[in-house]
Amino acid sequence: MSGRYFEEFEVGETIVHDTRRTISESDNQRFCDLTMNQQPLHLDDSFAEESQFGQRLVNGLYTMSLAVSFTIPETTDGTIVANLGYDEVEHPKPVFHGDTIRAETTILNKRETSDGERGIVEMGVEVFNQNDELVCSFTRTVLSLKGERETE
């Protein structure tokens, strides 16, 4: 288990995640198929060429899902009770096939639950492309376990 317990999160700290992913056309197609998203901006070359972007876009929910996955090892792997919500989702720039994305997490806030047995942690996640341009951002709120790391 590599995730953090509630006590191990420090408000204001930023975690730069090492995982990166180059998004292929196949990745985007499969995600759209699995979620039954038939938006032509993601799937239709002719339609997308006529758009302001001039090409197909990667599904924004796929970008966000990948970013969450990138954050799990250093934040909530094995220490989460539940994801409570995703808020303030923004996609300031598009992601295209062939772009490589990465994520950073900043701990925004934390507080114990009323029973004192768990904690709620708010994390700001920013997603960047290979040119370090912000392509997605959101707040992820989790219910975290409290506990001490075992010492050897």
Image: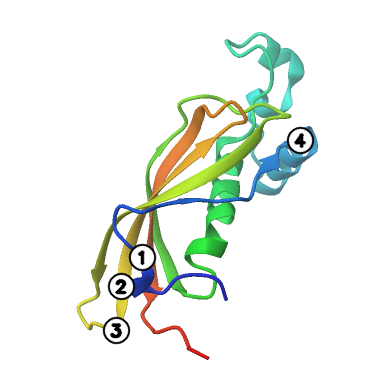
> What's the residue at 30%, 73% (across, down)?
119
Residues at discs 1 and 4 in contact (Cβ within 8 Å):
no
Q: Nearer the viewer, mark 3 or mark 1?
A: 1
Q: Quick one: which residue is furthest to the left in this view?
A: 114
Left or right: residue 92 compared with residue 49:
left
Q: Nearer the viewer, mark 1 or mark 4?
A: 1
Q: Residues within 10 Å of mark 3 (few under 14, many from 20)?
A: few
Real-space CA distance between mark 3 and mark 1, rounded to the nearest whole angstrom? 16 Å
Vertical position of residue 69 compared to residue 38: above or below: below
Amino acid type of the residue that numbered disc 3 sits on in the rendered structure: Glu
Q: Residues within 10 Å of mark 2 (few under 14, many from 20)?
A: many
Q: Secondary structure at mark 2?
A: strand
Amino acid type of the residue that numbered disc 4 sits on in the rendered structure: Ser
Residue 98 on image: x %, y %: 73, 29
Q: Residues within 10 Å of mark 4 (few under 14, many from 20)?
A: some
Q: Residues within 10 Å of mark 1 (few under 14, many from 20)?
A: some
Residue for badge 4:
24
Residue for badge 3:
117
Residue for badge 2:
119
